[in-house]
Image: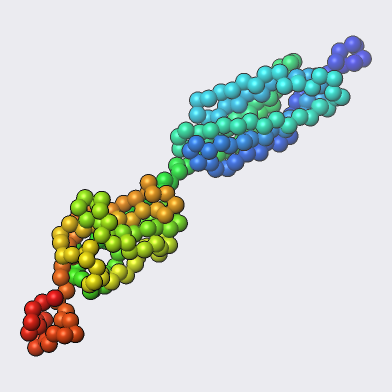
């Protein structure tokens, strides 16, 4: 003690630690540590991120600052894999006094934007003039652009329209007066994200569009399914 010429060592303390409770893989997290150092000496910080990365921040100090020095320091880190991590902080002064604290963080995977065509997905037979549902699922997409394509999903036969991605379905009446939609077995539905044309999907296999069996107004039907002339 000071009576016999000795000086009592005062301990440093970590008064607060703050940081994110959850992060995505690849996202930068920021942690803030506030430490109090009555000895007014430099502080060394050690951070164990829990993913086998240990960082030594040395000599962050308080030269000439009055006693009971308090400092706040921030640290950043990016996790590359998912998991539950415990971030450990250790603060040490020049005399060997130290304090520890920790926080937990959950690191989750990032869902990539995607589109999946549900129907038609191949082998269906749709008749011109009839109504069929085009259905899809999406994630991270706002709007979708739908077209009818043929021959390897490269030639646009018809532009169907732009819709809210969350709509997930559209009732399409197959035109009877579009010369680009002739009867055939080589059609696919192509759905892409309006905001990013690289986010796409199309029917896994070809489906068919066949001629309508309805009569025109100039033809006379003698039964529900046949015409006196010929099928349209």
Which is more toward the observer, 43 or 207? 207
Which is more toward the observer, 159 or 7? 159
Residue located 50% across and 41% down the image? 24
Query: Most extreme residue toward the top, as rendered?
Result: 5
Q: Answer with left or right where residue 33 lies relative to residue 152.
A: right
Residue 76 on image: x %, y % = 60, 32
Q: Classify residue 159 by image quadrant.
A: bottom left
Q: In which quarter of the image is the C terminus?
A: bottom left
Q: Answer with left or right where residue 152 lies relative to residue 137.
A: left
Q: Can residue 184 be seen in this snapshot?
A: yes
Q: Classify residue 217 by image quadrant.
A: bottom left
Q: Answer with left or right where residue 88 lies relative to residue 196.
A: right
Which is more toward the observer, 136 or 173? 173
Q: How many labels does the image show?
A: 0
Image: 68 above or below 213 = above
Residue located 43% across and 58% down the image? 143
Residue 127 on image: x %, y % = 19, 70
Q: Quadrant of the N terminus?
A: top right
Residue 100 on image: x %, y % = 66, 28
Q: Can residue 135 be seen in this snapshot?
A: no
């Amino acid at each position: 003690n000071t009576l016999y010429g000795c000086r009592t060592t005062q301990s440093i303390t970590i008064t607060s630690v703050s940081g994110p409770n959850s992060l995505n893989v690849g996202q930068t997290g920021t942690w803030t540590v506030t430490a109090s150092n009555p000895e007014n000496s430099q502080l060394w910080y050690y951070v164990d991120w829990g993913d086998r990365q240990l960082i030594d921040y040395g000599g962050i100090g308080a030269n000439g600052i009055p006693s009971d020095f308090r400092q706040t320091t921030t640290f950043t880190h990016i996790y590359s894999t998912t998991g539950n991590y415990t971030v450990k902080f250790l603060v040490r002064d020049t005399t060997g006094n130290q304090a520890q604290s920790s926080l937990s963080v959950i690191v989750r995977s990032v869902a990539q934007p995607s589109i999946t065509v549900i129907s038609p997905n191949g082998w269906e037979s749709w008749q011109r003039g009839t109504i069929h549902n085009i259905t899809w699922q999406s994630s991270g997409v706002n709007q979708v652009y739908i077209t009818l394509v043929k021959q390897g999903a490269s030639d646009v036969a018809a532009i169907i329209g732009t819709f809210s991605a969350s709509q997930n379905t559209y009732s399409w009446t197959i035109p009877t007066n579009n010369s680009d939609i002739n009867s055939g077995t080589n059609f696919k539905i192509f759905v892409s994200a309006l905001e990013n044309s690289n986010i796409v999907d199309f029917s896994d296999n070809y489906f068919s569009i066949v001629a309508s069996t309805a009569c025109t107004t100039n033809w006379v039907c003698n039964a529900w399914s046949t015409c006196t002339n010929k099928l349209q």
